[in-house]
Image (spheres, helix red, strand yellow):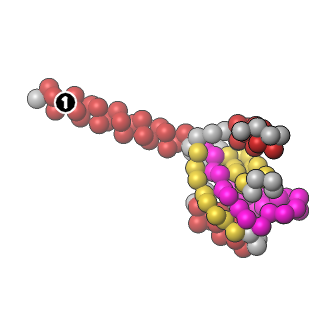
Amino acid sequence: MKTGTYQSIAAALLLALATGLAQAATTIRMQVDGLVCAFCGSAIEKKLRSHAATDDVLVSLEHKVVALSLKDGQDIADDTLRSQITDAGYQVKKIERVSQSLDSLRAELKGKAHGGR
């Protein structure tokens, strides 16, 4: 009986940990083709900022990355993001949710732009 109780507790803890990690993914990172000028970046940034769930937006033309951070407890569906970017004339290659902050992503991309990693 004790083994079953321990297993149940362990399973509950793992579920809680997995849920916490999923909630920690507050940055959505997208690979987007077709970004060639600052106007492109500004148009996408303006569209993404229009969502109530959006906290901040990053557009890197050089790395073809569009990312946004979400407000706590908020989300934007992948289909919505893909549709808006596609409708604006760009191709979304990949959408991923990461626990990396937008500031950390900015620093990483800046390092790559200056010969880092």
Residue 41: x and y, percent?
Answer: 82, 59
Instruction: Give the amino acid type for the residue marked by disc 1 in the picture.
Output: Thr
Q: Residue furthest right?
A: 38
Callout 1: helix, strand or loop? helix
Residue that carries the numbered disc 1 in the rendered image: 5
Q: Count the numbered circles shown.
A: 1
Q: Foreground residue, 12 or 82?
A: 82
Q: Is residue 55 above or below residue 47?
A: above
Side of 114 relative to 95 (left or right)? right
Residue 80: x and y, percent?
Answer: 62, 65
Q: Is residue 74 above or below residue 101?
A: below
Residue 38: x and y, percent?
Answer: 89, 58
Classify residue 82 by image quadrant: bottom right
Q: Residue furthest left?
A: 1
Q: Is residue 98 magenta?
A: no
Q: Residue at x 81, y 54 (%)?
A: 62
Q: Foreground residue, 68 or 29?
A: 29
Q: Which residues are the magenta region? A: 26-54
